[in-house]
Amino acid sequence: MRGGLGLLVLGNIRRFMLRKGMDDLFKQNLLRMRQPQNPTTFSEALFGHVHWVQKSAFNAPPAKTTAAQFTEKAQVMESLERYAQEKLGENKLTSIKIEGGEIAFKPDPTWDGIPQYSGFYDLRMDLSIEEEALELCLKNKEPGKVRILFVAESFRPAGEFEAELKDGFLNQLLPAFPLKTAELFGRMLSAMKLIDEEVIIYPTLSGERDLSSEVMKVVGYYRPEIIVTLGANSTHKILKGQERLAQVHGQFFNRKIENIGTFAVVPLFHPSIIENNQNMKKTAWADMQKIMQFLKKL
C-alpha cells in the first residue's frame, strides 16, 4: 500500500510539474511575443481569427515582419487560445488576469431593437426599397420555407433592370446584379440545389442609406437557416466588424437578434469578383459546398 501510494503521489507531482511547466512556457512565450518588435502587424494579422481579445497597454513602432516571426506568433497565438479556453472553461469566468493585462472572451455582437412582426403587411410597412424590387425579392416567400438569405451590397434602380426581366428565378436576382452577373449567380444557386421559394436576396444599401437593420427585420420574420453575405461591405455590416473578407470567407459566425433567435452567417466573395476572376471559382465552389452541407443539400 505504501509503495502504491508513493507512486500515486509521484504521479500527481509529475502531472503538477508538467502543468506548471506548460503554464510557465506559455507565459515565457507570451512575454517574448509582447516585446516591441511588430505588435501592429501581429494584432492586425491574428486578432481577427479568435473569439477573445488580449488587452494590453504598450505601444511600439511597427517593424518589418519575417515569415519565421509570423509562424512563431501564429503558434503562440494558437497556444494562447487553447490556454484561454481551458482556463476560462475550468473556472467558468469571462476573463482571466495575466501579467500585464487580461484575457477575455469577446462576445458576438447582438442585433437589438428588431421588431417581431405578426404578418407580412406589418413587415412591408417597415421596408424602404422600391416597390418593384420588393415585389421581386419577396414574391412567393413564406416563413418556414425560406432557407437562405443572401445579403447584397445594393440594389439597382428599377429603371435599370425592368428591360431585362424575363420569367423565373432570374428576375429576383436582377435588382442586385447586372444581367450577366445575375445569370452567373443563378447558375451558382442551381448548383447549390436551391429553388426559388428557399431564397431571398436583400440589400444593405439604398443610395447612401444603410439598410442593414432592414435585412435583420427580414431575417427575423422569415427565419432563414443561414445568412450569406456577398462582398466585403455587406459582410462588415451584418457581422458588425471590419473582418477582412479574404480571411473570413466560407467561415461560419453566429449573430443574435435579441428576443428572436441566433442565425448562422457565412461571408462569400461577391459574384462579380468570381465572374471576372477564373481562379476564384474554385474558392467560391468550396465555400458553397460548406453551405450546402449545412443545409443538407450535399
Image: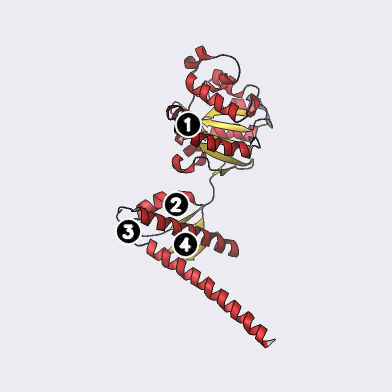
Q: Are marks 3 and 1 in contact (CB under 8 Å)?
A: no
Q: Which residue is mark 3?
A: 37
- The residue at the point 40 percent across, 52 percent down is 43
- Give residue 139's position: percent from left, percent from top: 63, 21
Mark toward the start of the polypeptide (3 vs 4): 3
Mark whose residue sits in front, 4 or 1: 1
Q: Give the secondary structure at mark 1.
A: loop
Mark toward the start of the polypeptide (4 vs 1): 4
Position of residue 290 in the picture relative to residue 43 (left or right): right
In the displayed orientation, state which residue is furthest to the top: 163
- Give residue 20's position: percent from left, percent from top: 51, 73
Q: Is residue 7 above or below residue 111?
A: below
- 3D distance between C-alphas at marks 1 and 2: 24 Å
- 3D distance between C-alphas at marks 3 and 1: 36 Å
Q: Which residue is mark 2?
A: 47
Q: Amino acid at mark 2?
A: Phe
Q: Which residue is mark 4?
A: 102
Residue 126 visible within the image? no
Q: Are marks 4 and 1 in contact (CB under 8 Å)?
A: no
Q: Give the secondary structure at mark 3.
A: loop
Question: Disc number at residue 270?
Answer: 1
